[in-house]
Amino acid sequence: MATEERKQEILENLKNAVIEYDEDTAREWAQIALDEGLKANDAIFDGLVTGMEEVGRLFEEEEYFVPELLMCADALYAGLDILRPHVEQLDLGVRGSVVIGTVEGDVHDIGKNIVKMMFDVAGFTVYDLGRDVPLDKFVEEQLRTDSDLVCLSAMMTTTMSGMEKVIHDLKEKNPDCIIMIGGAPASQDIADKWGADGYAADASNALKDAIDMVSSLKRLKQEAEAE
Amino acid sequence: MTAKERVASVFAGEKTDRPACFSGLGNVTTAGLEKLGYKFAEVHLDSRQMAEAAVSTPKLFGFDCAVVPFDLCVEAEAIGCEINTYAHTEDLFYPTIKEKVIHSEDEMDLSMPADVAEKGRVPLVCEAIGLAKEELKGEVPVGSYVLGPFTLAGQIMELNDLLKLSFKKPDKVEALLDKLADVIIAVLKRYEKAGIDYLTVREMGATSDVLSPRIFKKLILPNLKKIFAEITVPSVNHICGKTNPIVGAMVEAGADAISVDQRNEIIKTREELGPDALVFGNYDPFNVLVSGTPELVEQTINKCLDDGVSAVWPGCDIWPTVPPRNFEAMMDAVRNYAR
Ligand code: B12
C-alpha cells in the first residue's frame, strides 16, 4: 500500500500527464496507481480529471487551443482505459447517457467534440452521431439507447432551425428525455421557445447543467416509483 | 467612379469617391435567388446560374463586386472528394464534403491529380467568372477565393486528426500542406486566366479560435507566403476570429490586403500596421447584417470606417437571408460617410 506521500506523487503525475498531453506517461502512471494499490476512482478523479480541469482553465485563458485540448483528452482516455476495468461504479452521484451530434447540413464539429469530451470525462456513456446528422437519426438513437440526454449542436442559423423539429419529435415520442442545445447561434431564448430543457454557452456549463438535470430527473423517477 | 475603378483604387492605395463596400467571400442573397427563380442547392452546379446569382448582388444593391463560388468545397472536390449539395431540401444548406479522401495518418502522402485545375468544378467556376464579367461589362469587379492549405487539409481529412498531428507529426502535416499549396496555386492560376479582378485566400480553419498564434506562425505562414508570391492579381488574406495577435504575420504572408472579422480591434490593428496597410473588415455579417436593424447596420458601418478600415467588408460570407433593407442601409451608410 502506497504511503500518503507516494499517493500524492502518483496523482500529481497522472494530472501532469494529462496537462502535458502525454499518453504514454498517463498509461504508465495509471498502471503504477493500480500496482501500488490506489483506488481506481481516486486515480481517475483526483488525478486524470483534476488534470483535465486545469486544461479547461488553460483553454479559457488562451494558453491552450483546440489541438492541445484534444491531445489532453487523448492522454486522459489512455489512462482511463487502464483504470476503468477496476472501477466498480463511477460514482458521480449520477450516471447518465447522452446522444450527441451536430445537426443536418452542418459540419462544424469542433465545439461538439469538446462538449462530448466533457461528458466522457464525467463518466457518461456517450453515443456520438458525428456531424451533419439527419434529424430523424437523433430520435432513432435516443429510442434505441434510451439515453437520458440528447445534445444538439449547430453553428449556423439555418441548420439550427432543424433543432426545432428534433425537439418536437423527441418530446412527442419520449417526454422524459432531456434535450440540450448549443453552438454559436443558439441561446437560452431559443431553447425556451423551442422547448429544449437546457442551453449552455460552453462545454463546462453544459456538463454542470446536464448533471443537475439528470440528477433531478432520476430523483423524480425514484420518488414516483416509491409511491 | 465605377465599382471596378473604386476597388482598383483601394488596392492601389489611392483616393476613392466614397468608401468601397465589397467582399472577397460569398455574398449571394436569397433576394437575388428569388428574383432569378433559382434554388440555392442548384447554383453551385451550373455556371450560368452561378454567375447570375453572383451578379444579382451588385445589380440589386449596388454592391462593389460579384464573387464566385459560394461554397468551400471546390478544391477538395478537384482532389477527389464527393460533395453533398442537399438537393432534397428547399432550406438553405451549404454544400459539404461527403467523404474525405484521407482516412488515416498513413494516407497523408496521397498524391494529387496532375491536372487538378481541370478537375471537379474548377472549370465550371472559371466559366462562371467569364459569364459574370460579360454581364457586368467591366463596371463591377469579379472576385473569387481559394482555401488556405490548412483549411483545405481540414476538408480532405478529419480536422480533429489534423489538429493533433500538427503537434505530434508536424513533418507529415507540413508535407501535406506544401502539396496542398501547390494545388491551390494551380487552381488560382486558372481563375486568374479566367479573368478575376482580385482573389481572397481563406484560411479560416486556422482561426485563432482554434489554433494558437505560435502554431500559426510556424505551420500556416510559410505556405501562405508561398501562395501569395504566386498571385498576380490584387490579393487578400482572410482569417476570422481574434486576429489581433497575428495581424503582423498576416501582412508578412505577402497579400496586398488583410481581411479580419468583427472580433478584431481595428484601432489597435491600425496602430500596429500603420496608415498605409490595407485592412478590410470588419462588420458581423450575421448578427448585424441579417438580424440587426437598419440603424444598427448604419452605426456598425460608420464605426468600421471611423476605426480605420480601408474598405467596408464583411467578417465572413454574407448570409443569404440578409433583409434587403439592411443591405440598402449598408450601402447608404457608405455613400453618406464623410471622410
Ligand atoms: C472553423 C469554422 C469552419 C470550419 C469547420 C471545421 C469543423 N470540422 O468544425 C469549416 C472551414 C469547414 C467551416 C465551413 C463553413 N462555415 Co464556418 N466557421 C468556423 C469558425 C471560424 C469557428 C467555429 C469553431 O469551431 N469554434 C470553436 C469552438 C470551440 O466553439 P463552438 O463551436 O462555439 O463551441 C462551443 C460552444 O458553442 C458550446 N457548444 C457547442 N455545441 C454545443 C452543444 C450543446 C448541447 C451545448 C450545451 C453547448 C455547445 O460549447 C463549445 C465549447 O465551449 C466559425 C466562426 C466562429 N468563430 O464561430 C465559422 C462559422 C460558424 N462558419 C460560418 C459559415 C458561414 C460557414 C460556411 C457556410 C462557409 C461557406 N461559404 O461554405 C461553411 C459551412 C459548411 C457547412 N455546411 O457546415 C458562419 C456561420 C454564420 C451563421 N451564423 O449562420 C460562422 C459563424 C462564421 C461567421 N462569422 O459568419 N467553418
Image (tube, grey):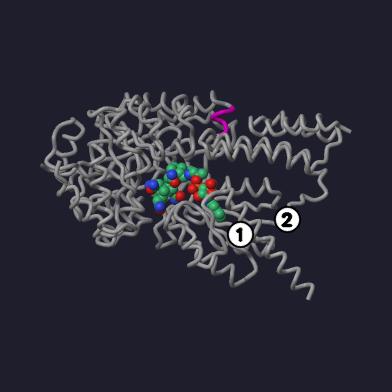
Q: Which residues are magenta?
A: B164-168
Q: Position of residue A49 (x, y in %)?
A: 69, 41
Assign the magenta stretch its main secondary structure. helix
Q: Amino acid at mark 1?
A: Val
Residue B165 among magenta residues: yes
Viewer-side residue, B297 vs B259 = B297
Q: Position of residue B115 (x, y in %)?
A: 39, 32
In what quadrant of the picture does the C terminus of chain B appear? top left
The subunit letter for the residue under badge 2 reads: A
Relative to B26, say whether A76 is above or below.
above
The subunit letter for the residue under badge 1 reads: A
Q: Is residue A104 left or right of residue B135?
A: right
Q: Residue furthest front?
A: A4
The label on residue A150 is 1
Q: Amino acid at mark 2?
A: Arg
The label on residue A95 is 2
